Image (cartoon, helix red, strand yellow):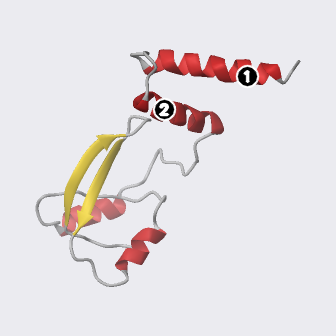
């Protein structure tokens, strides 16, 4: 799929792994294109963001660029658990100013609970 959209950048933020997350509001997309966008959810794509018209030279540069260092690998179970614990810390840090101390506290509780099954 190759599409060019006019859009508004609504938000720019960071994710747990330190990468950036950009939220775009697309303006008046043609019928059926919404379904195409939903189909590429979770896939890696190339993006050119400009506040000016896209020249043919820029278009060619995007087409020629290689997507390197990208994997379509899902997070490991331990990474997923860390993400969940981070979200819990955001909601209630239980007096831990730093996430790392909260993480260690919560992991020790999980480990202690699992050790009970060994006895």
SS state under label 1: helix
Position above or below: 22 against 77: below
Position above or below: 15 against 1: above
Position above or below: 36 against 10: below
**The label number, if any, that marks residue 113 in the structure image:** 1
Task: Name the foreground residue: 90 vs 13.
Answer: 90
Query: Which residue does the numbered mark 2 point to in the structure image?
Result: 88
Quarter of the image containing the C terminus? top right
Quarter of the image containing the N terminus? bottom left
* Among the two numbered marks 1 and 2 on one chain, the one whose residue lies closer to the N terminus: 2
Instruction: For marks 1 and 2, give the CA distance.
Output: 18 Å
Q: Position of residue 77 (x, y in %)?
A: 64, 38
- Specify the quadrant of the image occupied by residue 105: top right
Residue under the image location 41 percent in, 30 percent down: 90
Residue under the image location 42 percent in, 76 percent down: 35
Q: Position of residue 87 (x, y in %)?
A: 46, 35
């Amino acid at each position: 799929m190759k599409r060019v959209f006019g859009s508004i950048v609504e938000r720019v933020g960071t994710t747990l792994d330190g990468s950036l997350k950009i939220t775009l509001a697309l303006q008046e997309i043609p019928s059926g294109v919404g379904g195409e966008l939903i189909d590429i959810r979770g896939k890696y794509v190339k993006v050119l963001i400009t506040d000016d018209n896209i020249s043919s030279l820029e278009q060619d540069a995007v087409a020629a660029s290689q997507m390197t260092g990208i994997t379509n690998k899902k997070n490991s179970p331990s990474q997923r658990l860390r993400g969940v614990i981070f979200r819990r810390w955001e909601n209630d840090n239980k007096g831990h100013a730093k996430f790392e101390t909260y993480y260690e506290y919560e992991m020790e509780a999980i480990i202690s609970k699992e050790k009970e099954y060994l006895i």
